[in-house]
């Protein structure tokens, strides 16, 4: 039952993130034409993720992203069986968010936005997509480890907002190039509902690779603490006890 609760939390948290992100992208298209631009889209993604992390972090760990779950898996913070359940729950939450947005919003705006599917801009080739999505997800997972895994970072008590703000600045930096997905679930939900699969594999490969590299770097290097060196005190060079 505990694992079921965790999976439901993962599905709902992913819904938070994907509903806000997809809806914001639809709303800037005609005929809705909300004048919020890329900044509004970035804030929608970041704020929704911040709230979801703060709401469900204590229950499921607040992955909400198959790439994050893969990062936790390679560092042995989740078992393979539960990781599969988490990923399926995340994909379900993202797909439900896409279905709700497709049903609720104007069909012309949905079509113009391609239901908010993260896609490369015109002229952006495969190599750039892989590079940018790798870098953005690397930064996101580094932030997650820094504020939600590392006990030194937990003391700062801003985990949810630090993670959300990382998504926000990544969308502002890279949204115009690749859509700044950083999240295979965020890419799959609208692609499945809208039936658009062009470039889709890139949005799985790069985020998962970026997450795994960030997780291993933080777990194997940054998370380690050097032993406190002994200090000389008094005359005769005696080492302090303890």
Image (cartoon, rainbow, N blue to C red):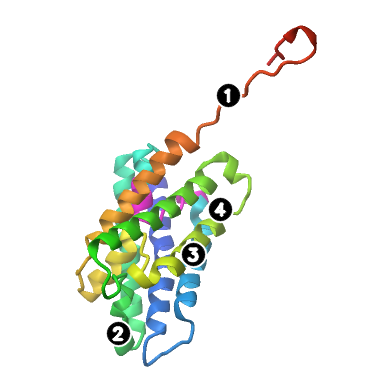
Q: Residue at x 34, y 59 (%)?
A: 133
Q: Residue at x 46, y 35 (%)?
A: 221
Tag of residue 169: 3
Dot 3, crowdedness within 10 Å: few (<14), some or many (≥20)? Answer: some
User: Could you tell me which secondary element the residue under label 2 belongs to?
Assistant: helix
User: Could you tell me which secondary element the residue under label 1 belongs to?
Assistant: loop
User: Could you tell me which secondary element the residue under label 4 belongs to?
Assistant: helix
Q: Is residue 33 above or below residue 92?
A: below
Q: Earlier in the sequence, mark 2 or mark 3?
A: 2
Residue under pointer 2: 112
Residue 63 lies in magenta, yes or no?
Answer: yes
**Magenta segment range?**
58-70
Q: Nearer the viewer, mark 2 or mark 3?
A: 3
Are dots 1 and 3 in contact, CB under 8 Å?
no
- Residue 90 makes an appearance in the image: no
Q: What is the spatial separation of the Cα atoms under label 3 and label 4, in whole angstroms?
A: 16 Å
């Amino acid at each position: 039952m505990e694992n079921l609760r965790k999976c439901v939390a993962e599905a709902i948290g992913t819904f938070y993130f994907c509903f806000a992100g997809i809806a914001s992208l639809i709303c800037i298209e005609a005929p809705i034409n909300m004048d919020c631009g890329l900044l509004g889209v970035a804030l929608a993604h970041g704020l929704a993720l911040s709230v979801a992390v703060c709401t469900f972090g204590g229950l499921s760990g607040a992955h909400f992203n198959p790439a994050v779950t893969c990062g936790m898996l390679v560092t042995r913070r989740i078992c393979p069986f539960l990781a599969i359940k988490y990923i399926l729950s995340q994909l379900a939450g993202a797909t439900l968010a896409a279905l709700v947005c497709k049903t609720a919003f104007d069909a012309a705006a949905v079509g113009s936005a391609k239901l908010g599917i993260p896609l490369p801009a015109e002229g952006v080739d495969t190599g750039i997509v892989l590079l940018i999505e790798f870098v953005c997800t690397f930064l996101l997972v580094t932030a997650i480890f820094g504020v939600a895994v590392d006990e030194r970072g937990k003391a700062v008590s801003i985990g949810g907002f630090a993670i959300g703000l990382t998504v926000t600045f990544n969308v502002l930096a890279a949204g115009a190039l690749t859509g700044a997905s950083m999240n295979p679930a965020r890419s799959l939900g609208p692609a499945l509902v809208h039936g658009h699969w062009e470039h889709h594999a890139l949005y799985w490969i790069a985020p998962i690779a970026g997450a795994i590299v960030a997780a291993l770097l933080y777990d194997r290097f940054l998370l380690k603490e050097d032993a406190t060196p002994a200090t000389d005190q008094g005359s005769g060079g005696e080492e302090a006890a303890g």
